[in-house]
Amino acid sequence: MSVNQQKTSGAFIAASWVALVAGAAAYLIGLFNANMQLNEKGYYLVVLLYGLFSAVSLQKSVRDQLEGIRVTKIYSSMCWFSSIAAVALLAVGLWNATLAPSEKGFYGMAFLLSLFAAVAVQKNTRDATAADGPATRPL
């Protein structure tokens, strides 16, 4: 299956990076300034890192499937599970947190912005790599 390849605009690439940096920075600055125990801060930091990694991995596996690159069902399922689990872990953590509702909303929105932007940055990076020509693949 062939995917139409168009060059990604510089504006979209810049907007994706700005969204990723803004979302992650806002989340991390909020976390740094939060009045919570260190173990709680660690939990939210790990959930962000896990979410970013799982979102990028999911984007890659979906894109590989679209381009006809074989992806095992177990890996694809793990990507979906990890992405859903990261969002669920944040939701459960915020539900049980002793934070103001506005703070909970802030963390939730910054987290989702970061995940979406990470997917967009990964897409742009892959599109730019594909535009450079076919990659050599090890056997």
Image (cartoon, grey):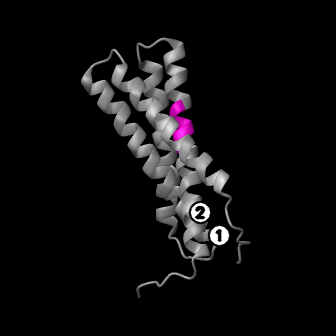
Q: Which residues are magenta?
A: 110-115
Q: Position of residue 54 (x, y in %)?
A: 46, 51
Q: Which mark is residue 31?
A: none
Q: Position of residue 53 (x, y in %)?
A: 43, 51
Q: Are marks 1 and 2 in contact (CB under 8 Å)?
A: yes
Q: Dot 1 corresponds to which residue?
A: 66
Badge 2: residue crowd in 10 Å (few <14, some 14–19, many ≥20): some
Q: Secondary structure at mark 2?
A: helix
The amino acid type, in three-letter code, at marker 1 is Leu
Q: Position of residue 137 (x, y in %)?
A: 46, 83
Q: Is residue 57 above or below residue 109?
A: below
- Outermost residue on the front side: it is 10
Q: Secondary structure at mark 1?
A: helix
The amino acid type, in three-letter code, at marker 2 is Val
Residue 113 belongs to magenta span: yes
Image quadrant assignment for residue 105: top right
Horizontally, residue 47 falls left or right of residue 55, namely left
Quadrant of the drawing holding the N terminus: bottom right
Image quadrant assignment for residue 39: top left
- Outermost residue on the bottom side: it is 139
Badge 1: residue crowd in 10 Å (few <14, some 14–19, many ≥20): few
Q: Position of residue 48 (x, y in %)?
A: 42, 39
Seen at 47% across and 64% down, the residue is 74
Q: Which mark is residue 62?
A: 2
